[in-house]
Image: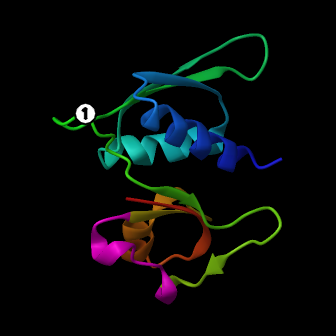
Amino acid sequence: MDTIGDFLTRIRNAGQAKHDKVDIPASNVRQGIAQILQDYGYIRSFKVAKDNKQGIMRVYLKYNEKGQPAINHVERVSRPSRRIYVKADKVPSVRSGFGMAIMSTNKGIMSSESAHNEKVGGEVLCRVW
């Protein structure tokens, strides 16, 4: 099961349905992705609530003045059946800098811009714009 793909699909569907928030099972990778989305202004915020299992992450979505979601497009790049890795000099640029890729590197989950600045490569998890 692709947990990151499930996370991205829940956010995409909640945005299209104009929901204010969405609840997702928590994990460290999902928290890293949510932190990057928050830092770059694609979501308002997120909170992690502990329960007896793995915890629940509540993601608060962001919309513009016209009521359109801040995330226009989100797609999974590397899947469990086909992993996509890039070297430090081949870090992708998404939509000429108007979007971003989220990567898993040996320094943690980071945006493609941060990976390029720190000269690290890794697995390209998803693209967002």
Q: Residue at x 77, y 49 (%)?
A: 2
Q: Quadrant of the rendered structure where residue 122 is?
A: bottom right
Q: Residue at x 80, y 62 (%)?
A: 80
Q: Residue furthest bottom?
A: 89
Instruction: Give residue 97's position: percent from left, percent from top.
Output: 29, 72
Q: Quadrant of the rendered structure where residue 20 is?
A: top left
Q: Residue at x 40, y 28 (%)?
A: 18
Instruction: Give residue 85's position: percent from left, percent from top.
Output: 66, 77
Q: Quadrant of the rendered structure where residue 82 is?
A: bottom right
Element type at marker 1?
loop
**Amino acid of disc 1:** Gly
Question: Residue 88 versus residue 102: which sits nearer the camera?
Answer: 102
Question: Residue 9 versus residue 16: which sits nearer the camera?
Answer: 16
Instruction: Give residue 119's position: percent from left, percent from top.
Output: 45, 79
| Residue 94 drawn in magenta | yes
Q: Is residue 74 above or below residue 59?
A: below
Question: Residue 96 versus residue 40: which sits nearer the camera?
Answer: 96
Q: Is residue 2 above or below residue 83?
A: above
Q: Is residue 61 above or below residue 90?
A: above
Question: Mark 1, residues whose alpha carbon is within 10 Å: few (<14), some, or many (≥20)?
Answer: few
Instruction: Give residue 11's position: percent from left, percent from top.
Output: 52, 38
Q: Which residue position is annotated with label 1?
A: 67
Q: Is residue 100 above or below residue 3?
A: below
| Residue 22 drawn in magenta | no
Image quarter where the C terminus lies is: bottom left
Q: Residue at x 41, y 46 (%)?
A: 37
Task: Specify whether 19 is left or right of 75.
Answer: left
Question: Residue 120 versus residue 73: which sits nearer the camera?
Answer: 73
Task: Specify whether 27 is left or right of 64.
Answer: right
Number of numbered discs present?
1
Q: Residue furthest top?
A: 52
Write the start and end of the magenta stretch as one range: 89-99
